[in-house]
């Protein structure tokens, strides 16, 4: 299922959500401009579980692997990766920001992204594969949306064999199915050498989503 838009109006301009999208797009355009130097760039600013574990487990301490937990949230591996993430953020992020407020939304976003990276590292601490993407943080946004707007209607494309059907579905169905797919693939990936089976860090998605479920209630309550 591919969401196109939600039928859930907001009351404030989602300035933080738009800013996050702009920064992600700008960062990707910079990646494209690097050409053959991109691999070296990812080695420094993408999350590499082995490097993070090595730097936090004992001296010498290097700031770059720790900083990558944040910088990796703004990097992407291709146009499709960027476009898919930004589509979900555009559809669901504005309503979450509307409910949490601008400042709390930004903190909520980063905490979910950080939790996603930590879970990915815990699942596969010896991996040397660079991991990038806003997916973990966006997963937390999806969880927040699911909790606060379970009945909101989402216009969704449903592929049925070679046909495409457009339907309005409750967010509970759309996002619930999304999480089931992430969990199923994450469980399968445990049988492989890396949790990033097929180039996707499934457990980062799962970790970000669970963090969103846990954090959205206190963030909303104490607004």
Image: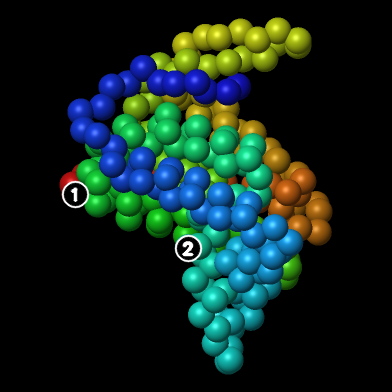
Comparing 2 with 34, the one in front is 34
Q: Quadrant of residue 159?
A: top right
> For the point 58% across and 23% down, which residue is it?
2
Comparing 38 with 168, the one in front is 38
How many residues crowd mark 1 within 10 Å: few (<14), some (14–19), many (20+)?
few
- Left or right: 193 in relation to 49: right
Looking at the picture, how far across and down is residue 24, in whole percent?
48, 49
How many residues crowd mark 2 within 10 Å: few (<14), some (14–19), many (20+)?
many
Farthest right residue in view:
192
Looking at the picture, how far across and down is residue 198, in whole percent?
77, 46
> For the point 64% across and 60% down, which residue is it?
34
Q: Answer with mark 2 or mark 1, whichever residue precedes in sequence.
A: 2
Comparing marks 2 and 1, which lies closer to the viewer? 2
- Left or right: 97 in relation to 195: left
> Do we see residue 107 in this rendering?
yes
Say if mark 2 contacts mark 1, CB within 8 Å.
no
> For the point 62% across and 15% down, which residue is it?
158
Looking at the picture, how far across and down is residue 130, in whole percent?
68, 62
> Do we see residue 209 in this rendering?
no
Q: Is residue 142 above or below residue 40?
A: above
Q: Secondary structure at mark 1?
A: loop
Q: Which mark is residue 27?
A: none
In the picture, the quarter occupied by the N terminus is top right
Q: Could you give the CA–CA distance between mark 2 and mark 1, rounded to whole angstroms?
A: 25 Å
Determine which residue is flagged by label 1.
222
Comparing 149 with 61, the one in front is 61
Farthest bottom residue in view:
59
> For the point 52% across and 23% down, which residue is it?
3
Q: Is residue 212 above or below residue 148?
A: below
- Left or right: 149 in relation to 120: left
Q: Which mark is residue 70?
A: 2
């Amino acid at each position: 299922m591919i969401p196109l838009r939600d039928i859930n109006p907001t009351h404030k301009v989602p300035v933080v959500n738009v800013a996050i999208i702009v920064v992600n797009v700008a960062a990707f355009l910079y990646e494209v401009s690097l050409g053959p130097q991109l691999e070296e760039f990812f080695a420094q600013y993408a999350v590499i579980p082995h490097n993070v574990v090595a730097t936090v487990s004992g001296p010498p301490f290097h700031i770059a692997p720790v900083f990558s937990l944040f910088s990796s949230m703004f990097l992407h591996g291709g146009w499709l990766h960027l476009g898919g993430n930004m589509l979900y953020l555009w559809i669901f992020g504005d309503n979450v920001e509307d409910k949490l407020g601008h400042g709390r939304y930004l903190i909520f976003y980063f905490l979910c992204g950080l939790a996603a990276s930590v879970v990915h590292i815990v699942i596969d601490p010896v991996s040397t594969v660079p991991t990038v993407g806003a997916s973990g943080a966006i997963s937390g946004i999806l969880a927040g949306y699911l909790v606060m707007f379970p009945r909101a209607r989402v216009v969704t494309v449903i592929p049925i064999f070679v046909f495409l059907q457009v339907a309005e579905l409750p967010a509970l169905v759309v996002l619930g199915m999304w999480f089931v797919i992430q969990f199923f693939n994450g469980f399968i990936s445990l049988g492989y050498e890396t949790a990033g089976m097929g180039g996707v860090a499934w457990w980062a998605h799962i970790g970000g989503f669970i963090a969103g479920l846990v954090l959205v209630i206190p963030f909303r309550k104490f607004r």
